[in-house]
Image (cartoon, rainbow, N blue to C red):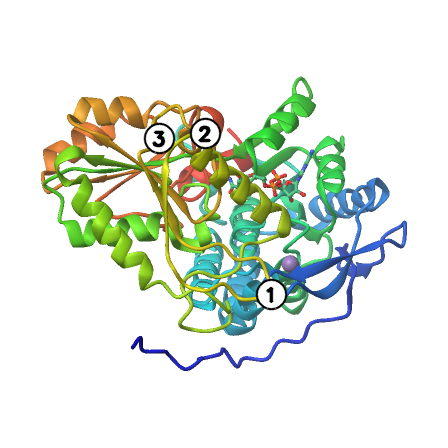
Amino acid sequence: MALAYAPSLESTPVRIRERYDHYIGGRWVRSSSGETFATINPATEEALAQVASGTAEDVDRAVVAAREAYERVWRPMRPADRAKFVYRIARAITERSRELAVLETMDGGKPIKESRDFDVPQAAAHFFYYAGWADKLRYAIPGASDPSPLGVVGSVVPWNFPLLMAAWKIAPALASGNTIVLKPAETTPLTALLLAEICEEAELPPGVVNIVTGDGRTGAALVAHPGIAKVAFTGSTEVGKAIARTLAGTGKRLTLELGGKAANIVFADAPLDQAVEGIVNGIYFNQGHVCCAGSRLLVQEPIHDTVVERLRDRIETLRLGDPLDKNTDIGAINSAAQHAKIRELVQSGIDEGATLVEQSCALPTRGWFHRASFFTGVTQAHRIAREEIFGPVLSIMTFRTADEAIEKANNTPYGLSAGVWTDKGAKSMYVAQRLAAGVVWCSTFNQFDPSSPFGGYRESGFGREGGIEGLRPYLTA
Ligand code: NAD
Ligand code: MN
């Protein structure tokens, strides 16, 4: 008989308003069209709140407010005082961390243990880290003795790490003396709006941070606005390319953090228990809604069957269900559209001849869920080996030599991240140096620190976020 765990539901209460307006110039402002849209809890399919649909006019108001704040208050302010505001935001995130975690989980579907232990602490850490840079900018760019801010930053972020991505944009922008207009993703706007409340409580000068909600049309209006000096985008490669076309020739600065199809390479001499945990973390963290997910597993031939067996056993122990349950490993898929996209790609894997292995648990009757799964018998030509699935689905392939692993790992238009598992330090260095990826994790996966730069090559985008490197895009050199 299988042992069942009693539910262990997170009990921190959050107050969700019925309707959220834009946060512009320090005030809550209705959409100029009066239109709103619902944001949904993907685990229950119920609407959580109505959110303002941003029009081009709303975007314009926000950019004007941000420009005014930039010229009158934020740029002239002593850098050490700017730092105090950024520290205040960091502390307030820490103080309200439980509330932020619950809201993140309700709006986006990720397990509470992830929003509580990863998303929110990482968001606070980014503000703490960049606050320290605010009065040390002259050391940020070698050779540039007096780098200055650019003006108004326009930022569009996705739904997989909503608060954390907002932090990745807002913290360096503010620390380097810029003001910002941020558009959260349409399925997950609520934590960015709570962050706006936090900015209010921190008495951040009005207009320094502005949040305009809406869908891709709002995002398109923001990046095209002539008052924007720099665009920072995280999201799909397709939209990234469209933004690059819009900005070409305008002189606006741009950083793009796009998709990925990371190789996770496991050599026969790797410590297998750790490697299997790394594989699980690499693909099932946040239901696989991770741009740097280790979605292509390359296993050295002699250990293929062993790894597959262990993975098959391991995914049986993953608990899928209510994201607010502290024991949940696999939460809800973020939206009906993403759920359909995952299912379509899984079907293509079956149709193209790969073998699907899934955990056997029952799915909740409401909400969008997808079992932890992997494919064996995958070839490099299969769609599931080439396209980003952005779900809890792993594609397993094999290799014989290190050079073959490198060649297969680099056989992708992306280049965001990779993992290497081996007992030999020299081998991991040999492989890591030859991988076309912005980040390579050796004998670990999905490690993040605000002092460490993150970003891609090729179709995964350009520019770095985090660390000193993450300040450069926000400063004139
Ligand atoms: P998306 O790129 O469409 O959305 C990301 C953000 O961009 C959202 O805020 C969206 O409103 C906005 N946006 C959409 N169209 C825009 C436009 N023309 N101009 C400006 N902003 C625009 O991503 P999606 O459709 O939500 O997801 C599709 C796929 O993208 C996923 O399946 C996944 O493969 C990939 N993705 C990658 C990341 C990442 O972190 N790199 C994040 C989310 C999605
Ligand atoms: Mn939602």
Residue 158 in sight from this viewpoint:
no
In the rendered view, tell whether residue 434 sits above or below residue 321: above
Left/right placement of residue 123 relative to residue 70 reads left
Q: Name the residue under label 3.
A: 437
Q: Mark 2 points at which residue?
A: 383
Amino acid beneath label 3: Ala
In terms of depth relative to the viewer, which is nearer, 293 or 33?
293
Amino acid beneath label 1: Arg
Residue 442 in picture, x, y percent from top left: 22, 42
Residue occupying image coordinates x 28% and y 53%: 312
In the rendered image, the quadrant that contains the N terminus is: bottom left
In the rendered view, tell whether residue 372 sits above or below residue 60: below
Please tell me which of labels 2 and 1 falls first in the chain: 1
Residue 435 in picture, x, y percent from top left: 29, 27
Tell me the CA gap for discs 1 and 3. Answer: 38 Å
In what element is the residue under mark 3? Answer: loop
Q: Mark 1 points at which residue?
A: 366
Tell me the CA gap for discs 2 and 1. Answer: 29 Å
In what element is the residue under mark 1? Answer: loop
Amino acid beneath label 2: Arg
Front disc: 1 or 3: 1
Residue 163 in picture, x, y percent from top left: 55, 56
Residue occupying image coordinates x 50% and y 67%: 323
Q: Is the C-beta separation of discs 1 and 3 under 8 Å?
A: no
